[in-house]
Image (cartoon, rainbow, N blue to C red):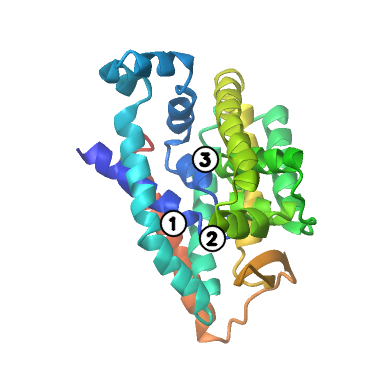
Amino acid sequence: MNSYLSLFLKGLAMGAANVIPGVSGGTIALITGIFERLILAIKSFDVEAIQLLLKFKIKELWTKVDGWFLTAVFAGIIVSAVSIALLFKYILATPGGETLLMAFFFGLILVSIISVGRTVKQWGIGTILSLLVGLGIAVGIALLTPGQENDAIWYLLICGVVAMCSMILPGLSGSFVLILLGNYKLIMIDAVSGFNAKILLPVILGAGLGMIAFSRLLSWVFKHYRDLTIALMTGFIIGSLMIIWPWKDTVKEVIGGKEKIIRFENWHLPDFGAMSTWYAVGLIILGGLMIWGMEKASGGKD
């Protein structure tokens, strides 16, 4: 029971993290020790799983897809979506709230880098290069300028694939990637609200293919190149700190009637003479202590 409660709480954290620009559920899954198990569970939805379903062998299917694990995690994500995530959205909308919330997640992810990095069994030239590649990609994404809207079927398929892969991959935000691709308004605002199947079907198909293919790729890479993979993801997470840094300017646009962050600029140091800065520093420490406590409580395993 304690194990499933822990998984539920980690699901809560994954759901809440998706509200913050630059933070993905995959990041939280990795730093809380459930990422590899999550990928394996997603990977298990294959032809054999369909055959078990068609034969009504529910118990065998449930065991194959790690059903209780997925139930606990996704229950947390769903509850978070209607509670904690809404709270975070409210905080982001209040003056100074964005800086404070970014500070909390900055501390959480900053400490998690140590937790994730030390799971690499042997550091060497290869793992260091892998880390630098991940870092470079994440920083490059943070500096990109959003593209133009494109409703071509092939581009919508790519949007689905890339968005889903970035949601799974630690350090990359799926919604932020859609904004960079230029299709956030088209897909998440216009198509969803209007139930536009012409737009949604290619995106859903791409997302499904991306999830199935990418989970298998990650599983294979983890199995054969575990240290290089974790080093790469550590680089992604380090690079995401640039997006989460609390003291920067955000360039926003109104997309579908809602104000959305489209890029970041003018990173700077805080004003240490302001009390709000010390509130933010306190939240950085709190975030770090929370991830440290979570790791100690769970031992990084479930």
Depth check, mark 1 against mark 3: the one in front is: 1
Image quadrant in which you'd find residue 51: top left
Query: How many other residues sit within 10 Å of disc 3, few (<14), some (14-19) or many (≥20)?
Result: many
Among the two numbered marks 1 and 3 on one chain, the one whose residue lies closer to the N terminus: 1
The reply to whether residue 55 is visible in this rendering is yes
Residue nearest the observer in this picture, 34 or 90: 90
Q: Secondary structure at mark 1?
A: helix
Give the image location of residue 47, x and y in percent: 48, 15
Residue type indicated by callout 3: Val
Q: Secondary structure at mark 2?
A: loop
Give residue 116's mark.
3
Location of mark 1 (residue): 16
Residue type indicated by callout 2: Ile
Distance from the alpha carbon under mark 1 to that under mark 2: 8 Å
| Labels 1 & 2 near each other (Cβ < 8 A) | yes
Q: Secondary structure at mark 3?
A: helix
Location of mark 2 (residue): 20
Image quadrant in which you'd find residue 248: bottom right
Q: Is residue 42 above or below residue 170?
A: above
Q: Is residue 44 above or below residue 179?
A: above
